[in-house]
Amino acid sequence: MIKKQTITNYINMETAIKTYDRNALVCGSPAWRYVYHAVHSADKWFFNPAKFTEPDFHENGMDNPDNPCEKVLSNEQLLDYLHKVQAKTEKYLDELSDEELNEKPDGCEYTRLELILGQFRHISSHIGMINGQTIERTGKFPIFAGLDGKQTDKLFDE
């Protein structure tokens, strides 16, 4: 169940990336920074933040949209990163036992289940924020995969 709903979250994030205005300002930062923030957070906090290695393209502080950043990631780079994090997450969940959900990863103060649920909340929050910006700009609602996890080629609910 966790894997199915996690995949659905990643599907919804992909749709958000394909429909948003990457340069629209959100709290003073371009929206793409919030996309990176959400994907980076999933990469770090879904597993074990105490044992995380930054991606090669990361600059210090880039994961915080409030920090100035010289580097600009394209939507293609963001989607590539999202797909890598999704594959890493699916592999992790395939190997995770029910017993391990209540254990804390080495050096981490939270259980694996707390980390997973925290990322469900975090990713969903940012998808909603990004989609709200898209709805305001376009008047169209980005398609949203639900409990069944069905993916469609459509980007908007029309």
Image: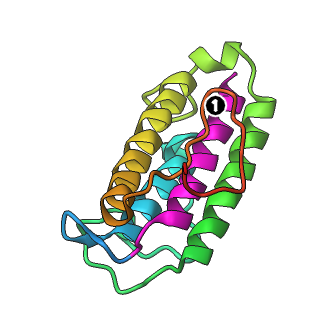
- Residue at screen point 35% across, 86% down: 70
User: How far across and down, in percent of the image, does residue 23 sit?
Assistant: 35, 77
Amino acid carrying label 1: it is Gln
- Residue at screen point 39% across, 49% down: 126
Where residue 72 sits, quadrant-wise, is: bottom left
- Residue at screen point 35% across, 67% down: 31
Span highlighted in magenta in the image: 1-22
Residue at the left extreme of this rendering = 28
Crowding near the residue tagged with mark 1, few <14, some 14–19, many ≥20 C-alpha atoms within 10 Å: some
Q: Is residue 97 left or right of residue 56?
A: right
Work out whether residue 40 can be spotted: yes
Q: Is residue 91 left or right of residue 45?
A: right
Q: Nearer the viewer, residue 112 or 136?
A: 136
Residue at the bottom extreme of this rendering = 70
Q: For the stretch drawn in magenta, what is the main secondary structure?
A: helix
Identify whether 37 is placed above or below 129.
below
Work out whether residue 104 can be spotted: no
Check residue 101 for magenta coloring.
no
- Residue at screen point 56% across, 48% down: 143
Q: How many marks?
A: 1
Identify whether 37 is placed above or below 55.
above
User: How far across and down, in percent of the image, does residue 61 sit?
Assistant: 34, 68
Identify whether 158 is placed above or below 70.
above
User: How far across and down, in percent of the image, does residue 2 sit?
Assistant: 66, 26
Check residue 19 for magenta coloring.
yes
Q: Is residue 3 left or right of residue 125?
A: right
The N terminus lies in quadrant: top right
Q: Which residue is mark 1?
A: 5
